[in-house]
Amino acid sequence: MSATIDRLDRKILGELQRDASQSLDEIARKVGSSKTPVWNRIRKLRAAGVIGRTTVLLDAAALGLEACFFVLIRTSEHEARWQARFLKALQARPEVLEAHRLAGDIDYVLKVRVANARAYDAFYQALISDVRIHNVTALLSMEEIKSTTMLPL
């Protein structure tokens, strides 16, 4: 169930998505309100689960993580025990930035960030040693055209 939010809440959320390190005064000024009502709304949005954790965005290339792979996984196993092992294997690997279970011919897609192809191979070898996978296809991203964490409000 989605939370009920009004126009001011959306403005506040938009500002927080743009830069969560802004002061309450800055946010209040930008959304046309004052500090206390903005703070109260942010607290309510956190309590309602609309706002999760606050974090920072790092530059992967600046940290030497220049290769981004999209990993398409097909499996012939769908029982709960296999899925639990697979989930545990993914959660244990910080290289996996995203993992999605899909409808269609591909069962899972992973977004994996590593330094290079050799590092991807080490990730791949570790993954298939932990869990049985029918077929894996790795696609190297040549260029990131758009990447955002901002939801459309």
Image: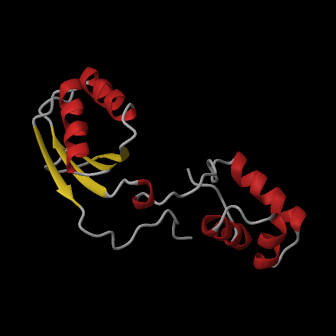
Which residue shows up at 67% across the image and 61% down it? Answer: 20
Residue 69 in the image: x percent, y percent?
25, 54
Residue 141 in the image: x percent, y percent?
24, 63
Locate residue 135: give its quadrant: top left
Residue 77 in the image: x percent, y percent?
16, 29
State left or right for residue 115 relative to residue 60. Answer: left
Q: Is residue 9 above or below residue 80?
A: below
Which residue shows up at 51% across the image and 57% down it? Answer: 58
Question: Looking at this rendering, what residue extends furthest in the top direction?
Answer: 81
State left or right for residue 29 relative to residue 112. Answer: right
Q: Is residue 125 above or below residue 101?
A: above
State left or right for residue 19 relative to residue 44. Answer: left
Q: Is residue 90 above or below residue 139?
A: above
Query: Could you say which is closer to the camera, residue 18 or residue 151?
Result: 18
Tell me the quadrant of the picture where the C terminus can be found.
bottom right
Which residue shows up at 35% across the image and 27% down it? Answer: 88
Q: Is residue 31 above or below residue 88?
A: below
Locate residue 136: give its quadrant: top left
Query: Could you say which is closer to the camera, residue 88 or residue 37?
Result: 88
Residue 151 in the image: x percent, y percent?
52, 65
Locate residue 40: give its quadrant: bottom right
